[in-house]
């Protein structure tokens, strides 16, 4: 167990851990960024995500991590829902191509499936469910959404997952072309975790920054 950790984030993804720290730490005064650690840092196993909604999967991860560490745990489950695919990949976003976490394969498969779809029918949205679970069983869930359209090819060097192909509504750049600060300001994950901050503050016994 990492000494002094006050909050654990249920992710083994280094990119996501950095993004979540960037969203949460500024809203939690006095919290040392080094006290916000990931599941890999505490040697936590990855639970089976067998829920059928983003919220269910986020809670599964947060419950398992809180039980493993005895600390308040924060988790998210997020994905891309494409209108013309009836909401798919949805909860299967991270393993759409068959192997969990293979971003390139997931992107290539999805773009191939949509190769004949006209721009006006490429609407999609990112959804994030952010969950907080305490060792004594207190639970909170918040949702965030980012609506946009899908590009025909990946663009941009930032972010991860499907960021290189989602163009947020009203803009011309993909999420991967946006500066990280701008992406966090508008993203589904940023919305969900900022909404969760009051519950995190209450659990950690701190007041939110004005």
Image (tube, grey):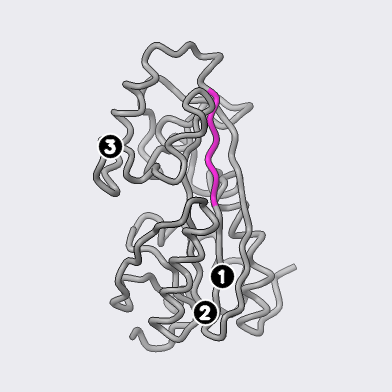
Mark on residue 72? 2
Residue 10 x, y percent position in the rendering: 42, 67
Mark 1 to mark 3: distance in Å?
A: 29 Å
Quadrant, the N terminus = bottom left
Quadrant, the C terminus = bottom right
Mark on residue 132? 1
Residue 105 x, y percent position in the rendering: 25, 35
Mark 1: few/some/many CA within 10 Å (<14, 14-19, 20+): many
Residue 88 x, y percent position in the rendering: 45, 34
Q: Which badge, 1 or 2, is on the more N-terminal residue?
A: 2
Mark 3: few/some/many CA within 10 Å (<14, 14-19, 20+): some
Residue under the image location 60 percent in, 48 percent down: 185
Q: Is residue 145 left or right of residue 154?
A: right
User: Measured along the vertical axis of the image, is residue 78 above or below residue 49?
Assistant: above
Give the main secondary structure, helix, strand or loop, of the magenta stretch.
strand
Q: Which badge, 1 or 3, is on the more N-terminal residue?
A: 3
Residue 40 x, y percent position in the rendering: 30, 70
Give the residues in magenta.
Answer: 123-128
Q: Is residue 176 left or right of residue 133?
A: left
Q: Which badge, 3 or 2, is on the more N-terminal residue?
A: 2
Mark on residue 97? 3
- Closest to the camera, between mark 3 and mark 2, is 3
User: Measured along the vertical axis of the image, is residue 110 above or below residue 33?
Assistant: above
Which residue is more in the foreground, 43 or 100?
A: 100
Mark 1 to mark 2: distance in Å?
A: 7 Å
Residue under the image location 38 percent in, 33 percent down: 156
Mark 3 to mark 2: distance in Å?
A: 33 Å
- Closest to the camera, between mark 1 and mark 3, is 3
Q: Which element is circle 2 on? A: loop
Mark 2: few/some/many CA within 10 Å (<14, 14-19, 20+): many
């Amino acid at each position: 167990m990492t000494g002094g950790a006050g909050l654990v984030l249920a992710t083994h993804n280094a990119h996501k851990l950095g993004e979540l720290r960037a969203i949460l730490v500024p809203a939690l005064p006095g919290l040392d960024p080094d006290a916000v650690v990931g599941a890999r840092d505490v040697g936590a196993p990855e639970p089976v995500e067998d829920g059928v909604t983003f919220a269910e999967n986020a809670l599964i991860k947060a419950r398992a991590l809180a039980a493993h560490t005895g600390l308040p745990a924060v988790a998210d489950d997020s994905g891309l829902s494409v209108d013309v695919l009836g909401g798919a990949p949805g909860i299967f976003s991270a393993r759409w191509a068959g192997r969990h976490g293979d971003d390139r394969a997931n992107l290539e498969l999805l773009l191939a499936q949509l190769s004949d779809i006209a721009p006006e029918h490429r609407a999609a949205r990112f959804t994030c469910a952010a969950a907080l679970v305490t060792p004594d069983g207190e639970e909170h869930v918040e949702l965030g959404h980012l609506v946009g359209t899908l590009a025909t090819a990946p663009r941009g060097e930032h972010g991860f997952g499907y960021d290189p192909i989602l163009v947020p509504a009203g803009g011309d750049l993909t999420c991967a072309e946006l500066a990280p600060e701008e992406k966090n300001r508008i993203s589904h994950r940023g919305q969900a975790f900022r909404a969760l901050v009051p519950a995190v503050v209450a659990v950690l016994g701190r007041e939110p920054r004005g």
